[in-house]
Amino acid sequence: MKEAEIESVSFCKTEANPSVETVEAAAELFSKTSADFIVAFGGGSPLDVAKAVAVLASYGGKITDYEGAGKVPGQVVPMIAIPTTAGTGSEVTAFSVITDHSRNYKLTVASNYLLPAVAILDPELIYTVPESTAAACGIDAMIHALESYLSKAASPFSEMCSLRSLELIGSSIIEYAADRQDKKSAENMMLGSLFAGIAFSHARLGNVHAMSHPVSAFFNVPHGVANAILLPKVVEFNEGAVDNPDLWKKYFQIYRCVCKEPVPEEKFLPSMLKGELKALNAKLKIPGSLKEAGITEESFSKVLEQMTDDAMKSGNIAVNPRKTERSDILKLYKETFQEKSL
């Protein structure tokens, strides 16, 4: 920016699972400038904060005023999104997810007006990501692709993006986490993340994301880690719907993408997918259970009912491939808390 002789002001205080207070602080700083646009540079958290600031800079109020879909009245301050992780796909999504600590709740602002004007993907920007961050963000992107692919709201367009994302990430995530400067793997991860972002913008997600948001809100577990821990159990739960031949084929396609040596289609069993996903988590050094992630049984038990209620508020529950009741979410949380890693 300096080399181009463009004046700028930086806000660099965004935390993981960014809060309402962070959005307010960034919006206050923006209001003191005469800025024409916002450059969102970083992982999903800075990108989501930038979207929220763009709304407040345009229309005022608090970000909680815009919670839900269709609350943003019109165009917002233009944004240039430059992701430095391969994970959220926030550079091409119409969502901003912000934590409201007063409710221990992750709120979502959803509007096509939040779509950045420009997205710039440069694989060199993710060469220096720590291994743990690369793994957590990468598995988050893969889950975006997986859940949008299985979603009841999936369309031929979203399925095409989901499957391409699964192919790119499945073939690269282990290599990228091990060596972030492997250019081809980094390129595949960035493109896979982008395609997954486009896919879930059209098809939404499922139970994994519905359940992970409360985990992050109450216990500050990184979003990608929470997703990865929940994924095997949710995939196992959704096996109850694979009597649908289309869903069976999708399970096989996902398995084919994440397994290095897949069995032929005629020998495939849907239960094989859970095992491959657990093995992938282990290779990426992701905890096998919520307990292994550092959550104590006492603290978990205290908020279990509230977490279940919050998960059920998510629109992602409605598009999960298997119909889900509150009792199902409660059971999944309990099982994921105690699940043993490989």
Image (cartoon, rainbow, N blue to C red):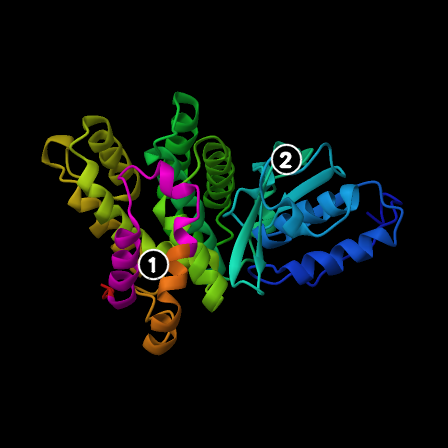
Q: Which residues are magenta?
A: 310-338
Q: Residues within 10 Å of mark 2 (few under 14, many from 20)?
A: many
Check disc 1 and report its element: helix, strand or loop: helix
The numbered mark, 1 or 2, whose residue comes first in the sequence reads 2
Residue 257 pos. (x, y %): 30, 38
Quick check: 160 left or right of 278? right
Q: From the viewer's perspective, is residue 131 above or below residue 269?
A: below
Residue at image location 16% in from the left, 45% down from the top: 271
Residue 44 pos. (x, y %): 57, 50
Q: Which residue is mark 1?
A: 229
Does residue 41 appear in the picture of this structure?
no
Check disc 2 and report its element: helix, strand or loop: loop
Q: What's the residue type where badge 1 is placed? A: Ile
Q: Which residue is mark 2?
A: 115
Residue 317 pos. (x, y %): 37, 43
Residue at image location 52% in from the left, 37% down from the top: 194
